[in-house]
Amino acid sequence: MITTSQKAITELENLKNSLPVKDKELFDRYFEVDTTIGKLQAPEAMLGWINKNFKSLERVENQKIVKVTNLLTMEGSLFNEIRASRPMECKVNDETRQIIENSAGDPFCKPTEGTPSDTFGRVTGKHSITASNIAKYDGYHGLVIFNEHNPLMVAKDAIADYFETALEWAKRGMQEDPEAKYYFFMWNCLWKSGASIIHGHAQMTLTKGIHYPKIEALRRVFQSYKQSYGTCYFKDLHQIHSSLGLGWEWEGGVKGLAYLTPVKEKEIILIAPEPGADLYNAVHRVLEKYMSVCAISFNLALYLPPLAPSKEDWSGFPAVIRIVDRGDPNNKTADFGAMELYSASVISSDPFRVAEVMQKG
């Protein structure tokens, strides 16, 4: 049997074709894989630079590129063997540490003085406190401000508290306005992820009428899949990834996978029947492993059904967490461009290497 460490995303087409019949059929239901070779001719003057940076002229002149498309959600990613072969290990540099230390004393360090409260007050957790976002995305838009200033300090009990405090905030907001039942939790870590303040914090919103479009689109895929095949979209998605060595199961039945069509680098999806300690502990586990490979700036989102009955069918929809690495915080090159915004994601990390990290220990 080929182990995960011996597999590579650039061999996905062959790996898929070698699966047992049922797993291959399931894969083909979800994913389309197209492999091509990108060719070029390099002038002699470039040979030294190419050999220094890419080790081999042959690798550059004939580049294997794999396009993976989720046929159900229409998410898609492009993997280049040169990009995907880069090592996972690195170290958090001193510049990042110094920036974090120098930012101490920001308004979030004294949240009751430096931030507004919501009209229903604040929720105080063991490791956090809520505030109202001063420039709102939606009618209800709050913050969970961590007691710990350094966003890279990710203690297990603290992470659970952030989720629990945010959910309590949502319940209080819905008591004030019962129509604001669609809850969304997001965590942007460091400036590369879009965080405007370094101090550790997460955000949460409540919206009305219908859930946010990307979440509603996933609900429709989930329900359509159940009607068409009589089974669960997420269960089968996890089975596909597990058959390739990209899926696993942790304590409490939390399922995880290194996604084949990530929105950006090292995307992990966690799936649980409902939110709770097991899911939050799994988040902690992912973030610890992220930190071990220098994925210190990240975006995290929690998808949940509405907090009260709604006109849409959400029956069976699980708690889903998506986490993605946003790259080196001190790299001035943006990781999102026109391809990601309007076409397909260009990915530098190999999901097989990501899964290998996640399943260690």
Image: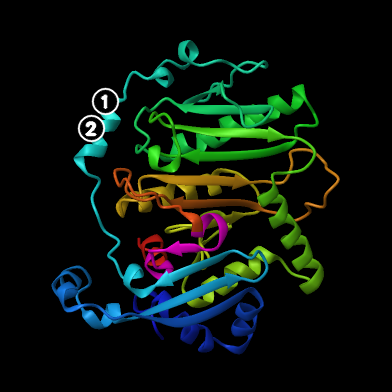
Q: As displayed, is residue 330 above or below residue 340? A: above
For residue 59, side relative to residue 208 (left or right): left
Instruction: Classify mark 1: residues with Cα within 10 Å, few (<14), some (14-19) or many (20+).
Output: few
| 118 and 99: which is toward the camera | 99
* Residue 262 image offset from top left, x and y in percent: 50, 61
Quadrant in the picture for the C terminus: bottom left
Q: Mark 2 points at which residue?
A: 98
Q: As displayed, is residue 313 above or below residue 48? A: above
Quadrant in the picture for the N terminus: bottom left
- Report which quarter residue 302 is drawn in: top right
The reply to whether discs 1 and 2 touch (Cβ–Cβ < 8 Å) is yes
Task: Tell me the kind of residue under disc 2.
Answer: Gln
Q: Find the magenta span and give its range.
A: 339-353
| 223 and 198: which is toward the camera | 198
Q: Mark 1 points at which residue?
A: 102
Task: Tell me the kind of residue under disc 1.
Answer: Asn
Q: Residue at x 76, y 58 (%)?
A: 220
